[in-house]
């Protein structure tokens, strides 16, 4: 029998969610997520400037963990160093380094700064002994190449909000990484991605919202919420031909296997 509060939202940005629908109370948002069966949330950093405020927001809540990192598209005034990331990752709520990676879709020109930033994060993961949260878009070859060169397999981690093809998924899996799917898999034009959902081994699959971004059907176009991870779970269940309860069991276990229990 499935217990309530078994789902985990393995990637969202709680500090960027609109609170107006929850009477401007963060705790109301969390209570709504709990009522929908979400037992844990990983709040992911995308820049160091807002990291202290993000940490302060979620610190009182045992059901929330955090990561520290700088998104590949973020233009930091000062590039983060591995040493700086390692120091910030010492906080007891911190379970991961990232999100990091490469995004050539929204960037132009010489992107060596992105590649160097990615390498610094991988080195930080090695030093802190914490897994990576990797973002990749339109940069398959370079992402995998840097992961191999920097021995990302020794740190482990997850390819978050995966939208690439099975070839890349297989390369990441071969490096020991998990594959996480977001509400994008519910989109009408995501048939190819749903084929990838079918093929990922059950012991390596995670689900997420990436809230407030990428709200799933039937909420597409609106602000995403952690509770909408239910729609991602429903889609995975349908695509894989298993029950939602089984999806919850698998993905929650996988999350704690990767990031540990709070």
Image: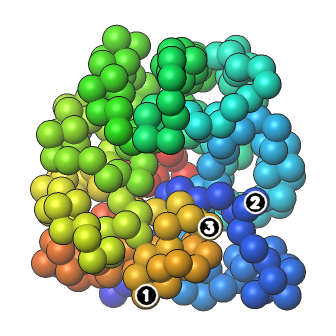
The answer to which of marks 3 and 1 sits earlier in the sequence is 3
Q: Residue at x 42, y 48 (%)?
A: 160
Q: Nearer the viewer, residue 137 or 131?
A: 137
Q: Looking at the image, is mark 2 or mark 3 earlier in the sequence?
A: 2
- In the image, residue 185 lies at what x, y percent? 31, 68
Residue at 72% in and 79% down: 29
Which residue is disc 2 drawn over?
Answer: 15
Label 1 vs label 2: CA separation? 23 Å
The residue tagged 3 is 212
Is 106 located above or below residue 210 in the figure?
above
| Residue marked by disc 1 | 218
Horizontally, is 82 left or right of 109 in the view?
right
The kind of secondary structure element at disc 1 is loop
Residue 131 visible in the picture? no
Colouring method of the image: rainbow
How packed is label 3: few (under 14 Cα within 10 Å), some, or many (20 or more)? Answer: some
Q: Is residue 78 above or below residue 103?
A: above
First in sequence: mark 1 vs mark 2: 2
Eye-nearest disc, 2 or 3: 3
- Looking at the picture, how far across and down is residue 194, in whole percent? 20, 65
Mark 2 Cα within 10 Å, few/some/many (few <14, many 20+)?
Answer: many
């Amino acid at each position: 029998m499935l217990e309530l509060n078994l789902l985990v939202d393995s990637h969202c940005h709680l500090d960027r969610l609109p609170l107006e629908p929850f009477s401007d109370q963060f705790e109301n948002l969390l209570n709504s997520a709990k009522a929908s069966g979400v037992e844990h949330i990983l709040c992911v950093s995308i820049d160091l400037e807002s990291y202290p405020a993000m940490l302060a927001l979620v610190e009182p809540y045992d059901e929330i963990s955090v990561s520290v990192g700088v998104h590949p598209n973020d233009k930091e005034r000062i590039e983060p160093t591995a040493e700086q990331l390692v120091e910030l990752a010492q906080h007891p709520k911190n379970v991961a380094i990232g999100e990091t990676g490469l995004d050539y879709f929204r960037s132009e020109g010489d992107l060596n700064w992105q590649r160097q930033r990615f390498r610094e994060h991988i080195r930080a993961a090695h030093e802190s002994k914490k897994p990576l949260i990797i973002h990749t878009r339109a940069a398959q070859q370079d992402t995998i190449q840097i992961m191999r060169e920097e021995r990302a397999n020794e740190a482990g981690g997850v390819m978050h909000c995966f939208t690439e093809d099975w070839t890349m998924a297989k390369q990441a899996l071969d490096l020991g990484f998990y594959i996480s799917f977001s509400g994008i898999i519910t989109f009408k034009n995501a048939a190819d991605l749903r084929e990838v959902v079918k093929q990922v081994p059950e012991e390596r699959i995670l689900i997420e919202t990436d809230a407030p971004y990428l709200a799933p059907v039937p909420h597409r176009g609106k602000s995403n919420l952690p509770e909408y991870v239910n729609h991602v779970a429903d889609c995975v269940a349908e695509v894989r031909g298993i029950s939602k309860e089984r999806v919850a069991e698998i993905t929650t276990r996988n999350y704690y296997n990767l990031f540990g229990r709070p």
